[in-house]
Image: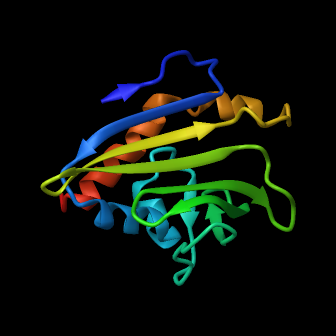
Amino acid sequence: MTESPSAESRVVSAERVIEAPDTAIFDLIADPAAQPRWDGNDNLGEAGAGQRVTGVGDVFRMTLTKGAVRENHVVEFEEGRRIAWMPAEEGKAPIGQLWRWELESQGEGRTLVRHTYDWTRLEDPQRLPRARATTPEKLRASVDRLAALAEGR
């Protein structure tokens, strides 16, 4: 497991090897309805079923724990390997944050999973404290919860 240093970095990440096939892990990430089960930020409330991401340009809706709705614009997608989205308020352009998941098969049902939060394009000063609070440890919590689900624990 590695984590990027510096709380002031606008790109933070965490990674680990999960004892599950990349396809099973990717399915948990690409299905927004499953995301609240592994969210280490405890920020995701619920997402409606039937929003499985299939490509760049998809938009999925997520209700946050405080009731706000986010439209997540998928900007990177490679089935089974990489997915990234940028959240936006309903009907608006993305806020400036990017959430990325990358998976690399390690063979024999093992997968290296890297989770990255990039807020280099975030300009809204009211959102900066929350962005700064999204640390590698919070990302690691998501990866660990994802691992527990994928590994059937």
Q: Position of residue 73 (x, y in %)?
A: 70, 62
Which residue does the image show at 19% across and 62% down from the upper left? 152
**Nearest the camera: 66 or 59?**
59
Q: Position of residue 23 (x, y in %)?
A: 31, 66
Splitting the image into 4 quarters, where does residue 14 fall? top left
Splitting the image into 4 quarters, where does residue 2 fall? top left
| Quadrant of the drawing holding the C terminus | bottom left
Image vertical order of residue 37 relative to residue 31, above or below: above
Q: Position of residue 27 (x, y in %)?
A: 39, 69
Image vertical order of residue 117 relative to residue 38, above or below: above
Which residue does the image show at 60% across and 30% down from the upper left? 11
Q: Is residue 48 left or right of residue 121?
A: left
Which residue does the image show at 75% across and 31% down from the upper left? 128
Count of numbered marks:
0
Q: Residue furthest bottom?
A: 50
Q: Position of residue 94 (x, y in %)?
A: 79, 54
Splitting the image into 4 quarters, where does residue 124 fall? top right
**Nearest the camera: 55 or 89?**
55
| Quadrant of the drawing holding the N terminus | top left
Q: Residue furthest left?
A: 108
Q: Is residue 26 left or right of residue 136?
A: left
Which residue does the image show at 55% across and 72% down from the upper left? 53
Q: How is the image coloured?
A: rainbow
